[in-house]
Amino acid sequence: MEQIRTLLKQVDCKTHLFVKDLKTNEYLIAEKMDEVFSSASIIKVPILCAVLHYVQEHQLSLNHSVDISPENKVDFSVITEQDLTTSTIYELLYWMTVVSDNSATNVLIDLLGFDYLNTYFHNIGLKNTKLQRKMMDFDRLNQGYDNVTTARDMADLFTMISQQTLLPEKLNRLAIDILCKQTDYERLKRYIKDARIAHKTGSLDTVCHDVGIVYHRNGNYIIGVFLTEVRDFEMGKRWIGRISKMVYDYYESDKGGETL
């Protein structure tokens, strides 16, 4: 992992990072795993899992229609653009994850409630993942209430998703399928566009994240790169891309003759 550690010394921000081999279930690298940071939109992954659990628990159809209240609509949203008043649970999950739609996320937060979501996060073993505000609620953010997580929580969550131990098989496959449709190719997929990755990005002014499962012929792995205190957002995306490419090349070499 010296190649990555050398790169990290050049990064002008705080980096939380892990690579976990899914065959051995061991970490190839783990940096700042337990330090809490702003989750940005990667909080949408545990929300995705919680909603699918809620669907199973209440025997709901994914085509179940949900009302959309005006206060949940925010800018830069598929829902807001179409001025929708209802949407199905599946559509809300799809938009929330694939295009990171904040209005869809807010509707789903209202559907389940903060208490249900945070209890679910705790029950599945996410020790430091908390939902404390809706998307784009900058009033709450300015009052000190942010959505937070840790690299370890994300590693544990994606491990459960990859091992299909979190949800019934059909719903777990659906979660992976939705995550694989992520449209942001500028971070983990920046330099490895042909790879199949079930992942989610997250962004704020000084935050740049990407985390997901990489399906590789020489062995699947989970990678999470979480940058905080970012001064140059475009550079942050490139750093994540470079780290991801180093790991991918390591697996391309069948983990022989190459070092990270």
Image (cartoon, grey):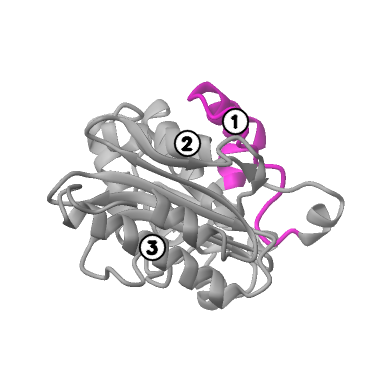
Q: Is residue 201 left or right of residue 255?
A: right
Question: Mark 1 and 2 residues: CB-CB less than 8 Å, in contact?
Answer: yes
Q: Nearer the viewer, residue 116 or 211?
A: 211
Rendered location of residue 61, percent (x, y):
34, 41
Which of discs 3 and 1 lies nearer the camera? The answer is: 3
Circle 2: residue type: Ala
Q: Which residue is mark 3?
A: 188
Q: Which residue is mark 2?
A: 50
Q: Which residue is mark 1?
A: 116
- Residue 128 lies in what quarter of the image? top right
Report the residue at 29% width, 44% height from top: 221
Q: Is residue 235 visible?
A: yes
Circle 3: residue type: Leu
Circle 1: residue type: Tyr
Rendered location of residue 257, percent (x, y):
19, 52
Report the residue at 57% width, 25% height from top: 122
Q: Which residues are magenta?
A: 109-137
